[in-house]
Image (tube, rainbow, N blue to C red):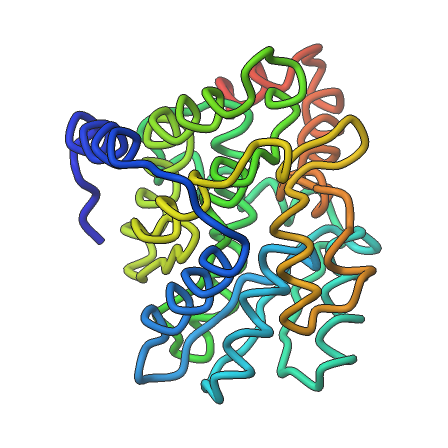
């Protein structure tokens, strides 16, 4: 996979921001469905399933489109993402494969591999990167080379805690879209290139970005909820309420990989996870 330069990415987002205009829930729904459909490969592919609204909705839309795919889920034994993903796949009779890590040594190997693949090493990059790498490895056993990811959903639907802390959540959405190259894209592309696979990110489809960013921020975030309009759309499209409104769990937390990293750091006498990664 080839990642466009950061300047080119920011320029594209700035152009979309300038062209932004008022949209509607129906237009966002249509753009979302089309973004998933047009990314569906002709060959069998994977959906990285965490049991959250983004991945569950992608899987459901792929199923509704009659696509040939397998859901892949990874995490520490008994982690919440595994429980949610299994329950969702069972409810919709989807093919799912799961890898449960039972020892710290097992997950430390994944941290090492993720660190080797990444150019920029920090807690977030290695934590999320190790989850992504582990799911891809699971899929590659099935000779799957294309994987759907929910990357971009938090940015366009105001899903981060930063959105509730700022005075202008809409501006924060644009800001985080521009910065997601440095924060997320370079990490995920590095892992994809190291494993020789393709990542499919429908939430970063230009038309979906345009329509989603044309929605009033009040339809996205309140004092109690984030990503409101996406959750409503998910329910409209057939996603059960419990999955549509599940609280956000970032990959490293829902998989318990972050907990594992902290335990590994402490077991080696380090107070901070970053020190552990630097020495790994």
Quadrant of the image for the N terminus?
bottom left
Relative vertical location of residue 92 with respect to residue 199 in this rendering, above or below:
below
- Which residue lies at the image location 54% right of the left edge and 66% below the top edge? 58
Image quarter of residue 124: top right
Relative vertical location of residue 64 with respect to residue 80 in this rendering, above or below:
below
The x and y percentages for residue 130 are 52, 44
Q: In the rendered view, does 14 fall on the left or right side of 145?
A: left
- Give the mark count: 0
The x and y percentages for residue 128 are 54, 40
Image quarter of residue 104: top right
- Which residue lies at the image location 47% right of the left edge and 28% below the top edge? 173
- Which residue lies at the image location 54% right of the left edge and 62% below the top edge? 48
| The one of 229 and 192 positioned closer to us in this rendering | 229
The x and y percentages for residue 219 are 63, 39
Q: In the rendered view, does 24 fall on the left or right side of 103?
A: left
Relative vertical location of residue 220 with respect to residue 229 in this rendering, above or below:
above
Relative vertical location of residue 51 with respect to residue 213 in this rendering, above or below:
below
- Which residue lies at the image location 42% right of the left edge and 24% below the top edge? 121
The x and y percentages for residue 3 are 21, 43
Q: In the rendered view, does 175 fall on the left or right side of 49?
A: left
């Amino acid at each position: 996979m080839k990642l466009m330069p950061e300047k080119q990415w920011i320029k594209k987002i700035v152009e979309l921001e300038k062209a932004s205009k008022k949209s509607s829930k129906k237009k966002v729904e249509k753009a979302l469905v089309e973004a998933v459909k047009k990314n569906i490969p002709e060959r069998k592919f994977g959906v990285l399933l965490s049991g959250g609204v983004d991945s569950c909705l992608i899987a459901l839309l792929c199923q509704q489109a009659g696509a040939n795919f397998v859901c892949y889920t990874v995490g520490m034994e008994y982690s919440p993402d595994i429980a949610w993903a299994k329950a969702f796949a069972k409810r919709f009779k989807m093919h799912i494969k799961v890898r449960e890590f039972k020892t710290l040594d097992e997950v430390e190997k994944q941290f090492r591999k993720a660190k080797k693949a990444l150019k920029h090493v920090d807690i977030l990059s290695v934590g999320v990167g190790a989850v992504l790498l582990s799911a891809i490895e699971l899929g590659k056993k099935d000779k799957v080379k294309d994987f759907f990811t929910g990357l971009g959903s938090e940015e366009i639907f105001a899903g981060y805690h930063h959105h509730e802390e700022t005075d202008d959540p809409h501006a924060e959405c644009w800001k985080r879209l521009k910065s997601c190259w440095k924060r997320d894209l370079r990490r995920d592309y590095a892992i994809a290139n190291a494993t020789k696979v393709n990542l499919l990110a429908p939430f970063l489809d230009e038309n979906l970005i345009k329509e989603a960013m044309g929605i009033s921020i009040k339809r996205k975030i309140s004092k109690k909820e984030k990503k409101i309009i996406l959750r409503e759309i998910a329910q409209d499209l057939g996603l059960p309420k419990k999955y549509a409104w599940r609280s956000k769990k970032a990959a490293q937390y829902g998989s318990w990989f972050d907990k594992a990293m902290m335990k590994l750091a402490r077991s080696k006498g380090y107070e901070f996870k970053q020190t552990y990664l630097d020495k790994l």
